[in-house]
Image (tube, coloured by chain):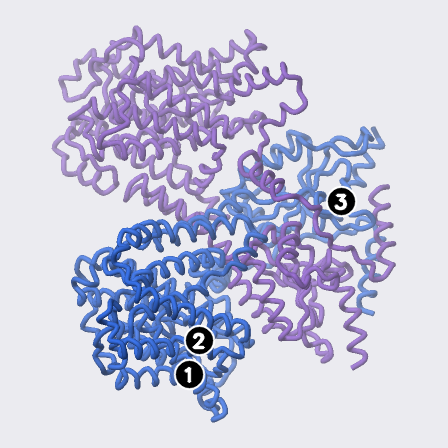
Chain colours: A blue, B purple
Amino acid sequence: MEANASKNMHSHCLEITMEVHKVVPPPHRSTIQKLKTKLKEIFFPDDPLRQFKGQPLKRKLILGAQYVFPILQWGPNYSLKLFKSDIVSGLTIASLAIPQGISYAKLANLPPIVGLYSSFVPPLVYAVLGSSRDLAVGPVSIASLVMGSMLRQEVSPSKDQVLFLQLAFTSTFFAGLFQASLGLLRLGFIIDFLSKAILIGFMAGAAIIVSLQQLKSLLGITHFTKQMDLVSVMTSVFHNTHEWSWQTILMGFCFLVLLLLARHVSMRKPKLFWVSAGAPLVSVIISTLLVFAFKAQNHGISVIGKLQEGLNPPSWNMLQFHGTHLGLVIKTGLITGILSLTEGIAVGRTFATLKNYQVDGNKEMIAIGFMNIVGSSTSCYVTTGAFSRSAVNHNAGAKTAVSNIVMSVTVMVTLLFLMPLFQYTPNVVLGAIIVTAVVGLIDIPAAYLIWKIDKFDFIIMLCAFFGVIFISVQDGLAIAVALSIFKILLQVTRPKTVMLGNIPGTDIYRDLHHYKEAVRLPGFLILSIEAPINFANITYLNERILRWIEEYEPEDNIKTHSSLRFLILDMSAVSTIDTSGVSLFKDLRKAMENKGVELVLVNPLAEVIEKLQKADVAHEFTRPENLYLTVGEAVASHSSAMKVQSSSM
Amino acid sequence: MEANASKNMHSHCLEITMEVHKVVPPPHRSTIQKLKTKLKEIFFPDDPLRQFKGQPLKRKLILGAQYVFPILQWGPNYSLKLFKSDIVSGLTIASLAIPQGISYAKLANLPPIVGLYSSFVPPLVYAVLGSSRDLAVGPVSIASLVMGSMLRQEVSPSKDQVLFLQLAFTSTFFAGLFQASLGLLRLGFIIDFLSKAILIGFMAGAAIIVSLQQLKSLLGITHFTKQMDLVSVMTSVFHNTHEWSWQTILMGFCFLVLLLLARHVSMRKPKLFWVSAGAPLVSVIISTLLVFAFKAQNHGISVIGKLQEGLNPPSWNMLQFHGTHLGLVIKTGLITGILSLTEGIAVGRTFATLKNYQVDGNKEMIAIGFMNIVGSSTSCYVTTGAFSRSAVNHNAGAKTAVSNIVMSVTVMVTLLFLMPLFQYTPNVVLGAIIVTAVVGLIDIPAAYLIWKIDKFDFIIMLCAFFGVIFISVQDGLAIAVALSIFKILLQVTRPKTVMLGNIPGTDIYRDLHHYKEAVRLPGFLILSIEAPINFANITYLNERILRWIEEYEPEDNIKTHSSLRFLILDMSAVSTIDTSGVSLFKDLRKAMENKGVELVLVNPLAEVIEKLQKADVAHEFTRPENLYLTVGEAVASHSSAMKVQSSSM
């Protein structure tokens, strides 16, 4: 019914010839109002205070508390049923977290125990503040790698351990501070500049770097380079062949195969997630027993060695906000902060969409930030939601953040009573565990998809990848980000302009190169500009449009029509315009007048109309005969006018 | 006729209910073809080789020669009539060029004679290579100021003059090299990033800085600060009050008034352009006579002093491409190069539009670049087309670049025979000349217009202005450019999304907030996205669209309609999309399925369709019922479908 009705009305209104719809200036709004809406769009696009509107004060307070502490949302109606599935998943990720914690700590050149500390406190903090139900919190490979490599530029972890530890905690603090303030200042969109393409390339590169670092323990080399890049690592590996120990290599190879097999199984059958989840702990136990049985540590297999027991000692007294290394520490904090934040947020969003619930990006940032600030004063280094572990958590059927609590309790027990057991754990197994963990970061299919969809994105990805491998992690990132910003600027400086043609039998106008049936109308040049017009592209647009006009020759040979009479600019896609943009139209109008061509604007948007009005005192642009709501109407009214003249010729 | 015909056909086709127009994928083009067109748009938007197409070889060669040396275009049919007007304008700008040349050279801390050298060789080069007919070539105030101030950071012009001169020539060489390569590499768009707003703020600031520098000669101070910024200049002026000489001040004041009056007259009556054009030379002559008559140089009025005669000595042996100052020299070359290029191009374009002829930006850059490269090896410092002088040239009726030749010949004569006359020219007059010249750079009305049109541009302008005044010329520029790039990025990260409504009696859909008569259709949410979709804005778009949906409640209360059934995205304005953009649509589709809302895309452009097709194997997006050519058709076909269901409820 309705559709037909509207159609009839429509065709009806078209019978009334020349009935056109005015382009009206938008309803007036003061500068303040405009500024307010603009700022809201910039900082509060998700309108977080929406839910508070029109609620009684008491309710508002409750909502506020729940907003700050999401645990108050799901806590009250938490049931035994939920707890059952949470405890399973919690124990599962704990069995993964303990060996990984130790391994990643070594990756960051920190004492293994710090890795366990970092799996104890932060999960508790996140359970209270975090809004994701699947995030499994703890240290992650990439942030560990970056922190380790960056700090090692200035301080040797082996020579002055204490200083190195202080710097690690301090940069963790800055990372947290940075993350939290990003969330508080609603500047979350900054992490969006690490595009998917960048991350895929970067992750793959980092995975390779990390694996290369493991050659030290996998081959049992004692004199290993301090550099990270492919070349120097490889040289140092093959210059120290005499240090290779066959026992280590053999053991490493066996456990690597074992772990990779386990991973393969779980990937094939997600039901068997526990295989890959349990494998690391199992191999730690087995290898430890082996070493213990055969006194293998005396046969060239290096072991972790004594670890002190007990919970996290306080470390706020170790934070240093002065001294020569402050610059480095802040830089490290920023980069590790951004990287871990990106991973955490991405993980949160992924599982949120899977289970169809919302995570508030900025809120997550605050949660992760506080988690790291607290961590930095309780002997933890930078932590976030790890992808692999969260996946296990999800598969193990985690329902709420309680699984994090279960995990951290398990870790606590380990810290209190089980530390001596790790004394004989061989480093080679930790190396194997890390390699298995990071292999998953190399995502070939995704890379191929990018290649298929967008070649430029693919190049950016390659830059990130090779930058990380051959130069350094942070430089690789920087190059890739710079490139993708350059890509955006290029798009802005070279906006699309397409020539429109009429689709016969309609008043629809579409791209001539896209819709082959579309035809050009003699005497008209109809262009649509597909981007905001600003200082960066007016020169291009000017030249381009003039070129369109010079190239103009209609197919038909009716002489009276063959000359260009009207330039119609469809402005529907010009979302905004600046002072330079306004001047472009003034220049165009002048140029057109010289050529005897009439400039007609179609459907300029609110902002554009306003600015054009403010700019031209003569109201040249807002004259009705130069301003139409649709291309069809513009063409209709002008072509009839043209007929009259041409017939009089 | 035609219009009505098309209308009838149109209304006719509308009677056939549900007749919709397929959205077809664009005709296939290989990656190479696409890359080719892309690169062409980036580097050859003006298609310079257009004219060569389909010409015989001989003609091609001629055209090629004319393309490289525009003089061959207008040279052959140059007439005595043209020469008459050229010689007038040539002599006029010469009378302006000589005193200005001397003054600007002093502004750049260079010996006055270099200013005259720079008004002799470069104009000849430009006359051969340049494509503008009105550009009057020579040294300009801002480039002189910047070069002087930047080089003085490391080398004192008074202590080691020769080194300073060498650096000046070398940076001129780099400026030219940079300008020429910008043109050759077709990267001209880089100067577009100096937006109008920036330039207005920057020019005004520079004008003030320049004028402040003149206080030295206007007050006759001998110990003057080496700093440029407002504060330090003012302090040094008022700490040296004892050095002020009343004779100098008196003389300076008189001539300043005289010159400003002359300028005022010419601005009132463009016919009297020669008043302001001649004034500088006249005041130089008078002041020189006065000094000579009263031996004023012995009464505290400083004069230029002896100047050697003769034409430009070669200076390629003075170019230094090594040593400690190389970095500074290159930096100076870049900045002065960009600044002078921007001025030159802007001037060329302005007068080209006035007289309705084309200047090829990239060709101009090559011309100006070569001009400076040649200049650097013939004792000239950086030159370009000066705005004030070109205006005079234009008003004096210049027809071709011959006026430049006339000017440079006049300068040559001066260099050969008239130099001794300048021995007694007082510096104070040169100061007055500079101040009068730069006052014109302060453009209050333009600033006001920017304030009216775009507040953010106004802020950028202020940053440039105050940055130049209080910090330094180059930093002021840098800050402003950074800000305007940030503005672009902000626009990209926060693209416009508007809710469309149907304008009653038509199938036109427009912004609900803009067109008050537009009405929402129950069951439909129609959004149009007004920007390319990429990594920087997918998060925002996702949140924003979900918010639109949550906020959705139609005005009417017919329960069966009040629930959202269709989300229609008008993609007409989405000019391009990247891999992240594709993933956005996948996520959206998932989210919509969970909400039981159908996602419909309207008029995606060629590139977008292609990428979506490549991305989704299931062809979810390219199903006809999810893809329409116009919003009207999408609504029509779906609303009828909805009717059927709702009636069956």
Q: Decide which of B107, A618 is in the foreground and name it.
A: B107
Residue found at x 41% / y 76%: A279
Residue B109: image location, x then y, percent: 24, 26
Mark 2 vs mark 1: same chain? yes
Q: Earlier in the sequence, mark 2 or mark 3?
A: 2
Q: Earlier in the sequence, mark 2 or mark 1?
A: 1
The image quadrant where one finds the C terminus of chain B is bottom right
Residue found at x 20% / y 59%: A155
Q: Is residue B461 left or right of residue A563?
A: left
Q: Decide which of A313, A490 is in the foreground and name it.
A: A313
Q: The disc labelled 3 sits on which kind of residue?
A: Lys
Check contact, mark 1 vs mark 3: CB within 8 A: no
Label 2: which residue?
A135
Residue found at x 63% / y 59%: B528
Regarding residue B253, the answer to whether it shows in the image is: no
Query: Which tag is nearer the camera, tag 2 or tag 1?
Result: 1
Q: Earlier in the sequence, mark 1 or mark 3?
A: 1
Regarding residue A136, the answer to whether it shows in the image is: yes
Query: Which tag is nearer the camera, tag 1 or tag 3?
Result: 1
**C-alpha gap between disc 2 and disc 1:** 11 Å
Q: Specify the subunit that label 1 lies on.
A: A
Label 3: which residue?
A516
Mark 1, secondary structure of its residue: helix
Mark 3, secondary structure of its residue: loop
Residue B40: image location, x then y, percent: 57, 36
Label 1: which residue?
A90
Which mark is drawn over residue B527?
A: none
Q: The disc labelled 2 sits on which kind of residue?
A: Leu
Q: Is residue B41 left or right of residue B370?
A: right
Q: Dot 3, crowdedness within 10 Å: few (<14), some or many (≥20)?
A: some
